[in-house]
Image (cartoon, helix red, strand yellow):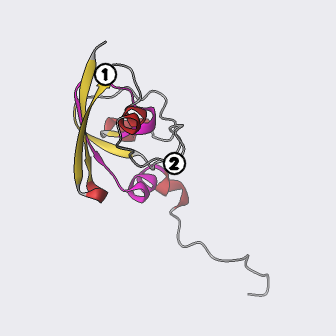
Amino acid sequence: MTSHPITVHWRQEGRVITHSVPEGDYILRSFEVQGDPLPFSCRNGCCTACAVRVLEGTIDQREALGLSRELRQQGYGLLCVARATGPLVVETQDEDEVYELQFGRHFGRGKVRQGFPLDDE
């Protein structure tokens, strides 16, 4: 079976990790099996906890529901649903940063207030 070198620059931990991942296997799962669990939350491609920026190579992430086409085109990916298709180098991102890029235009309309405004306010 063909395997590919996958390198993750884990910014938050100050580490660079490389593992050989079999063709078609989920990258996040393969790293876990090889003793290097990476950040994640849902494993379904719906949140941004495992978000990365692709530095070299490409990934198959057709299951990444939580990432817009625009962000994918800008080089973002979700490792929980990313499959190895060739050599790859990625860098982890801050979850809030990618979440804001993905959803900020919908939720970024000012601060959230506690409670509801009363008619006499």
117 sits left or right of 107 in the view: right
Q: Say few, some or many: other residues with alpha carbon within 10 Å of mark 2 (under 14 / 14 to 19 / 20 or more).
A: few
The furthest residue to the right: 119
Depth order, front residue of 45/40? 40
Which amino acid is tagged 1? Thr
Residue that badge 2 annotates? 41
Q: Which residue is mark 1?
A: 85
Question: Quick check: marks 2 and 1 in contact, CB under 8 Å?
Answer: no
Segment tinted magenta in the rendering: 77-102
- Horizontal side of 112 relative to 31 (left or right) equals right
Quadrant the C terminus occupies? bottom right
Q: Depth check: give the residue in front, 97 or 26.
A: 26
Asked whether, in this view, residue 25 is left or right of residue 12, the answer is: right
64 up-or-down from 110: above or below: above
Q: Residue flagged by tag 2: what amino acid is it?
A: Ser
Query: 66 or 89, which is in the foreground?
Result: 89
Residue at point 36%, 56% (across, down): 94
